Image (cartoon, grey):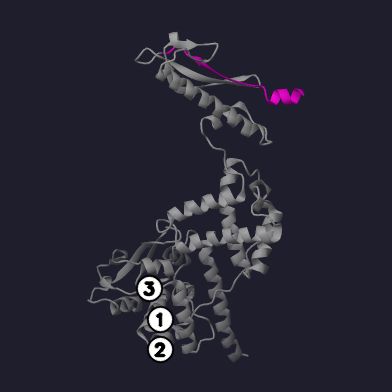
Amino acid sequence: MQAFEQFTDIHISFFCRTTYENEKCQNPIVLRVSYRGERRDIFTGLYCYKSDWAPKMGKVSRTEPLAVAINRNLDAIHHKAKQRFDELRFSGDEFTIDDLMDRIKGKEPPPQTLAEYMDLKLKELNDRVDIDLSKPTFYKYNRTKNYMEEFLLSKKRIRNIPVSRVNADFLTQFFHFLRKEKNNSHNSALALLFCLKTILQMPLRNGVLKTNPFLELKISAKTVYRDFLTIEEIETLEKLNLDSEFMERTRDIFLFACYTGLSYSDIYQLKKENLIPENDGTFHIHKPRQKTGIISIIPLLPPAQRILKKYSPSDDIREFSWYVPTNQKLNKNLKTIGETAGFDKKLFMHLARHTFATTVTLSNGVPLETVSKMLGHSETKTTQIYAKVVASKIKMDMERVRSIFK
């Protein structure tokens, strides 16, 4: 009984503060809340003459329309304060008088469920698309949200979960769902899981999630061999006869990526102002990467300049104009082009970026730091992946020499 009395020991009242007057010589009406031995005051925004205030009633004593309107507002404020108290009272959580005052002032509590935080993050990311965020990145977060909804329904038989219940075991189960049920590769599933890691930063900051569950997660990325084209394969593509203008343009866009290291989204966004002329008649690309915003500075090799000139109505390659279809459409046609060329490996746009990093630059002695700058990597350890590929290529090349010198 004592605990109940303590929990409901609240007093809500109004008083007229006589220590302050506005320009009309009226005094402010203040809401006073007392709870568990503590007291807080909030200015209501209403004024009256102190001679019109009835302290025992906590209202204005007059009956003209203005006084009636003030009293009606005071009743509404009292009702709102009591309602906010009841919301906290029946939430089952401990709260302080400051928590109550925040509610009365209209400060909403932070979200409590995983779905709420996912929706908030998706809204934020959607507002950033084509500003400092690429559409593919947004789609990846949206896919994570959709997969999570499906996971909760199919595996947990629920539509939502308190974010406070997200722990390492929950993340591991979701990872296996992405692998087995949705057929994602190990690293693709991990990338989707890391979208969830970003989403959880907000509840961690708000204190709704007490500890970071990813600190206990025992899943790491697997080393993946990054394929690339050889010089001979690039030359084969350049000489390949294709039966349509569209397929030829697809091949040229791919080769341009091989010679510049630009990703699909950066080629899609490439504009005249990104091509900077040099005094010797050459050009370099100066462009922030769509994915990271980091500036890429890439000297244009002669084959890349010839490709742009092919699509320019004048001798100025900066006047180039070509239609870049969707990444999916390009990759579909690149697969056909690769088969036409007789390649065993599958062609896709990002393979061109791997080719630039390995065959075009690192294999020809370009320093790792320079390649990293051209690729727009935020740190050289990302570029180091390609250095390992080059090392394996050297080993394979030397195997042929080894067979000679037995």
Quick check: marks 2 and 3 in contact, CB under 8 Å? no
Instruction: State the image quarter where residue 28 is shown.
Output: top left
Task: Count residues near mark 1 (Cα–Cα under 10 Å), then give few for <14, some for 14-19, many for 20+.
Answer: many
Kindly identify which numbered label has been placed on residue 324: 3
Q: Kindly identify the residue that appears in the image at 53 percent across and 82 percent down.
A: 345
User: Which numbered disc, 2 or 3, marks the residue closer to the eye?
Assistant: 3
| Residue nearest the observer in this picture, 379 or 67 | 67
Q: Mark 2 points at which residue?
A: 240
Q: Does 7 lie within the magenta span? A: yes
Asked if 337 appears above or below 171 in the picture, the reply is: below
Q: In the rendered structure, does residue 216 fall within the stretch colored magenta? A: no
Task: Label 1: state its secondary structure.
Answer: helix
Residue receiving disc 1: 251
The correct choice, above or below, for 100 with respect to 120 in the image is above
Q: Which amino acid type is marked by label 2?
A: Leu
For the N terminus, the quadrant is top right
Instruction: Please indicate whether residue 35 sits to the left or right of residue 317 in the image.
Output: right
Q: Which residue is found at the position 42% from the left and 76% from the top? A: 258
Give the Cα distance between marks 2 and 3: 20 Å
Q: What residue type is labelled 1?
A: Arg
**Label 3 neighbour load within 10 Å: few <14, some 14-19, many 20+:** some
Q: What residue type is labelled 3?
A: Val
Residues in magenta? Answer: 1-20
> What secondary structure is found at the residue carrying circle 3?
loop
Can residue 18 be spotted in the picture? no
Q: How far apart are marks 1 and 3 (CA)?
A: 11 Å
**Total labels drawn:** 3
From this view, report whether residue 18 is shown above or below residue 80. above
Residue occupying image coordinates x 51% and y 33%: 106
Badges 1 and 3: C-beta atoms under 8 Å apart? no
